[in-house]
Structures are given as structure tokens and as C-alpha cells.
Image (tube, rainbow, N blue to C red):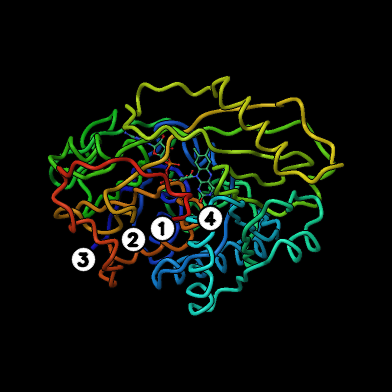
Amino acid sequence: MTDSVAVVGGGAVGVTAARALADRGVDVTLFERGAIAAESTGRAAGICYDAFAGRTDAAVAARAMARFRELAAETRFSVAERPYVWLAREGDETRAEAIREQVPRMRERGRAVELLDPGALAAEFPALRTDDVAVAAVARDAGCADPAEYAAVMAERAREAGAAIRTETEVGLTDGPAVVTPDGTVEFDAVLVAAGAHTRSLLADAGVAVPIKAYRVQALVTEPIPASERVPTLYDATAGFYWRAREGSLLVGDGVEKRDFDPEDWDRTADEPFLASAIERVDAALAPGETRPSAVERSWAGLCTATPDRDPLVGEIDSGFFVAAGWHGHGFMRAPALGRTVAGVMLGDDGIGEFDPTRFDGDEQFPVVEGMTVE
Ligand SMILES: Cc1cc2nc3c(=O)[nH]c(=O)nc-3n(C[C@H](O)[C@H](O)[C@H](O)COP(=O)(O)OP(=O)(O)OC[C@H]3O[C@@H](n4cnc5c(N)ncnc54)[C@H](O)[C@@H]3O)c2cc1C
């Protein structure tokens, strides 16, 4: 029987799992070393969509979108419905072909996505530059949300369901399964590690190896521009960046550094080359005649987590130790589904075979590959 569970990490994933466990009558304590959403969740862009071609990914994304909307109907959390467009430009035949090939597979999975030729793209989204677009696709079941608000609301829900949420409480792990708190070691029936970029080092304390690397990404918010009200969420696969509208401005992201970062020692500020190139790429992606942003209101960096096969680790990794991490930049949009999945696995439900964390030995060598990519 699993009566008592510790969840380590108060990001989108940990709070979702804590709520699901508490809802099922488990005695849950969530430990977060900072505030709720202190790390990647508080730095995320908040883009969510269901445009996945794989059977599992598409089903997870559809479930997550439904749960986002359910939460929005019940609480102050909100989802701004906005189509998600991804495109390749002329001369980038590899990515154009990849998009042409993906979309029918997504449709087979029942996803509301379609290919748009440049004319149709221009007609629907006149604020986009389309004259050099080779192929574009649009996902209709998509939106944007505030990840920190999601985590705050989920933490409240978890608390209401009986979970203890201990913020400003850094913990370690030890065999048992047990959690080493500032007040001493506490044993639990099961421990879930949903500690984002810190997952690998935390589990190593308990002698458990997981192949998760942390890589650095960057984002900025432009000054307000009128086009922000009219553009879709965009991933320009050729230029390698994304944007979403946010409060009259554009939130622009990219600047991926594909190497393993020490989660205790990295630069949280965006660098100048990223800021300059992001503004240039926004300029190139807006239709002629649209006002361009020339100033950046704020910018930051954050960490994402990578695994050898780009699928996350969700499930039991060692006796009594569970893990939910390795999202390749898609952890927010999948949290409502996979946070519940891992909670269920802790209580004996079936997990998702492809995401079973024991598929690796833990000492794999692998290159970091970013998540938002078309190939
Ligand atoms: C710039 C940027 C943009 C992004 N945009 C998107 C997006 O648009 N859509 C999307 O789906 N994803 C996006 N992501 C990815 C997304 O942020 C992550 O996948 C998601 O937030 C992961 O949530 P998490 O709960 O696993 O991890 P986190 O949010 O990192 O939570 C882990 C928590 O564990 C805590 N912790 C760590 N060690 C300990 C310890 N020893 N004791 C106690 N607590 C501990 C940390 O303080 C942290 O709060 C983006 C990421 C970045 C950086």
C-alpha cells in the first residue's frame, strides 16, 4: 500500500502529481526548495498544443489540453486560445518536407491540424510575412497560459485536497525511500522526484542513475506592438525561434545551448547575441507594413531537460523512487497529463511503456537535442 508520498519539486509537474495523489486519499508532502514555480515552470513561455504525430504524444497532449481547459473553467487559471503555426521557408526543403509528412500523421491521430499554403496562411494571418514560406501548418487546439499561475492554482488545489506543501525547503534523498529534510530524515512509502534540472543529482544521492541533462534556453518579451493581437503562436523552423503573444507584446524564445549545464551554476540572464538575433528574426517574420519592435522589455534564461531518446522518464526508477522529468522543452504543456500519470503509477496504475524510466541504464552518453525542432 502506498499511503505516504513525498514529492520533490514544486514545478508544474510536481504540483500536478501532488494534487492527483491527494485527491486519491494519499498522505502527500511536497518539498520545494524555493517558491512554487521557482525554476523552469516560472520561466516557461506557456505555449500548449496537441500537434504531435506519435500515438502516445498525441494522446498525452489531447488529455493535457482538456485538463488545462477544465482547470480554467473551475479556477482563476486561464488559457488564451490561439492557433499554433509552424512553418519552413523556401530553400529549407528538409524541414518543409518534414512538415508535409507530419501533418497527415497528426490528422490520423485525430488532431485538428492542417497544411496551409502561403496564400492560405497570408489570408488567415496577414500580420505574418508569407512571401518566402515553403509550407506551413496550423494546429487549432492550441493556446497560451501562464505556467506560474497554473502551478500556483494546482498547489492550492493540492492543499485543499489535504497535501502539505513545504516551500523554501530543500531536501536530499536517501535509501528507504526517504527524504533528508532540514529537520531530519523522513521515510515515505514512495518518493517522486520531479525536480526538473536537479533530478539527476538528487537521485544520485540515493544511488540511482538517470540519463538527464540540463540545457540552457533563452527568451525575451518585446515592447508592445499592434501585431501581437493578430499573430498566431509561431514556430519558424527555418529561423529556429518561436513567439507567442503576451499582453500586447511578443514573447520570443530560442537561444538554445546544446550542452549539459550544472543546474547550480548557470547564467540566468539572456545574452546580447540572443537579444539581437531574436529581434532580427521577429523583424523578418512580420509582414511588411507591420510595426517592428525595436526594444526588449525583459529577457531571461532557463534550463530544460534532455534524455537520450527525447522521451521523458515517467515512472518507477528504483524500489520506492519515482521520477517525472526530461521534457525537452515541452514539460508545461504535458504536465496536466503526465503529472497525473506518474501519480497513478505510484498507486499501481499502468504507466506509459515508452516513458518507462528503466529503459535506460542511467550512464548513457548522448548529445543534447532540443525539443522544438522539425526534422
Ligand atoms: C525559456 C523557457 C521557455 C519554455 N517554454 C515552454 C513552453 O512554452 N511550453 C512548454 O510546455 N514548456 C516550456 N518550457 C519547458 C518547461 O518550463 C519545463 O518543461 C517545465 O516547467 C518542467 O516542469 P517541472 O515541474 O518538471 O520542473 P521545474 O519547474 O524546474 O520544477 C522543479 C522544481 O524542483 C525544485 N527542486 C529542485 N531541487 C530540489 C530539492 N533538492 N529540494 C526541493 N526542491 C527542489 C526546483 O526549485 C523547482 O521548482 C520552457 C522552458 C524555458 C526555460
Alpha carbons under labels 4 and 3: distance apart: 24 Å
Q: Which disc, if any, is residue 157?
A: 4
- Three-letter code for the amino acid on which mark 2 is drawn: Val
Residue type highlighted by circle 4: Arg
Task: Answer with mark 2 or mark 4, whichever residue precedes in sequence.
Answer: 4
Q: Place residue 167 in its image quadrant.
A: top left
Residue at screen point 49% across, 67% down: 102
Mark closest to the chain's N terminus, 1 or 4: 4
Mark 3 or mark 2, which has the lower sequence index? 3
Residue pictured at 56% horizontal, 65% vertical = 65
The residue wearing badge 3 is 1
Whether tag 2 and tag 1 are in contact, CB under 8 A, the answer is yes
Is the shortest distance between ligand 1 and the CB of mark 1 under 8 Å?
yes
* CA distance separating discs 2 and 1: 6 Å
Callout 1 amino acid: Gly
**Above or below, comparing residue 298 to residue 248 in the picture:** above
Question: What x and y, as percent, mark residue 244?
Answer: 67, 47
| Residue 327 appears left or right of 137 | left
Above or below — where is 276 with respect to 244? above
Q: Secondary structure at mark 4?
A: helix
The answer for how far apart the CA atoms under marks 3 and 2 are is 16 Å
Residue 200 versus residue 160 in the image, above or below: above
Q: Which residue is mark 1?
A: 339
Q: Report the image quarter containing ligand 1.
A: top left
- Of tags 1 and 4, the one toward the viewer is 1
**Mark 3 or 2: the one toward you:** 2
Question: What is the spatial separation of the Cα atoms under label 2 and label 4, in whole angstroms?
Answer: 18 Å
Q: Which mark is residue 342?
A: 2
* Element type where label 1 sits in the image: helix
